[in-house]
Amino acid sequence: MKQILMAVSTSLLLGGTVSAQKVAFEEFDLDNGLHVILHNDPSAPVVITSVMYHVGSKDESPDRTGFAHFFEHLLFEGTENIKRGEWFKIVSGNGGTNNANTSDDRTYYYEVFPSNNLELALWMESERMLHPIINQIGVDTQNDVIKEEKRYVYDNKPYGNFLSEVKKRLFTKHPYRWSVIGSMEHLDAAKLEEFRAFNKKFYIPNNAVLVVAGDFDKTNAKKWISQYFGSIPKGAPIQKQTFAEEPITKTISATYEDPNIQIPAIVAAYRTPSMKTRDARALDMISSLLSDGRSSRLYKKLVDDKKMALQIGAFNVNQEDYGSYVIFGLPLEQTPTTDILKEIDEEITKLQTDLISEKDFEKLRNKFENQHVNSNATIEGIAENLASSYLLFGDVNLINTDIDIYRSITRDEIRQAAKKYLNPNQRLVLDYIPAKSKSAN
């Protein structure tokens, strides 16, 4: 279904900008503080049940990093009524799929089932919230799984530590400074009681949002939600800590040696504002203008025309408290990385000095219209967007109105955002280079 929808969307995009249909939803709260969002779409006989918890790596202690990601795995171990190792068997045996993911700001679990299995999905997620089994065998098992994941995704993968090395230099006080996967030493040192305390604090109804989206009967859905989630006790209120970073006022220069690469990379990274701000949207548009696709400014200049780079990219890491704007380049042959950085700076200076053309501006706006449509092209995408809009932005209807903010961004706002955030004295310059071979003794 997802491939069909995407194919239809792609064919429509060839003719111009697609008009997004409004996502209808109903929302309400249970007495225990669980926020519930329902989105009915009978176009396909599937239903997604998801729970997003407002806990991510930023909620960890500096000496116990990796807990939120650990729980992404641990809470599949089993519950009082779902035996260890049975979770995935139940899901697949009833024609479903499931997964979870963790960020700095939140953790997200979901199941996709045929429509006639909504009650099963709601029961399973309520079990995860109310009756998780957190014991030593589960902790030890997932500890080994996560160590293997770290080796595969970070330690043994070319450029695998790229973003981690950026984060720990851009942030000195905020927990964004450590990676989501955290420290294996911290996980090894943690006691079982610490894992149980973390679960009791964060995986509670008043720190979560439940989304049901797809083909379902609302009367039955509300009955089952009340039946399975209504009796879960409300947790103690969570006081979120705030961390204020001092402004970066001079270039941070750093080097990291990666044993898994042969081609160096040059990285320029800037600390940016919360994703909730207009400036964050303007930076999204700058990112797209500079490096989204072969027609983007940096790609055409450095890869196509001057043939200085094998690859060039820019992206805005949108987060709840701060963001990170990152530009990276891989040189072609003997091109000095300093030359690539100089060319990047020239393009940023143009953005800071001149308004982008009306033609480029219209192309940019069309691209964001299309991205908005595509993000809501599947029931899975809608469910996650509904959850994020509520939990991270405090406005479920942002799923419909966020595109209006992008539409309202002006050319001058794009220029001002570049002038405000993308200056050499406000950034990290990271030389990400191959590890030097050790000479034999």
Image: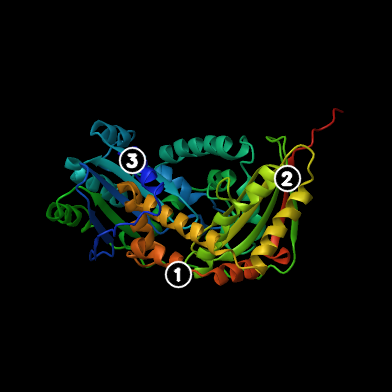
| Mark 1 or mark 2, earlier in chain | 2
Q: Quadrant of the C terminus?
A: top right
Question: Is residue 197 among the parts visible in the rendering?
Answer: no
At x 68%, y 35%, the residue is 260
Q: What amino acid type is highlighted by mark number 1?
A: Ser
Left/right placement of residue 177 relative to residue 267 reads left
* Other-residue count near label 2 (Cα within 10 Å), few / some / many at <14 / 14–19 / ≥20: few
Q: Which mark is residue 218?
A: none
Q: Which residue is mark 3?
A: 2
Left/right placement of residue 242 relative to residue 402 reads right
* Nearest to viewer (mark 1 / mark 3): 1
- Tag 1 secondary structure: helix
Question: Is residue 43 among the parts visible in the rendering?
Answer: yes
Q: What amino acid type is highlighted by mark number 2?
A: Lys
Q: Which mark is residue 306?
A: 2
Residue 287: percent from left, percent from top: 57, 56
Q: Quadrant of the N terminus?
A: top left
Q: Which residue is mark 1?
A: 408
In this view, the residue farthest toward the right is 441
Mark 1 vs mark 3, CA separation in Å: 30 Å
Residue 372: percent from left, percent from top: 40, 55
* Other-residue count near label 1 (Cα within 10 Å), few / some / many at <14 / 14–19 / ≥20: few
Whether the residues at callouts 1 and 2 have beta carbons within 8 Å, the answer is no
Mark 1 vs mark 2, CA separation in Å: 35 Å
At x 27%, y 39%, the residue is 82
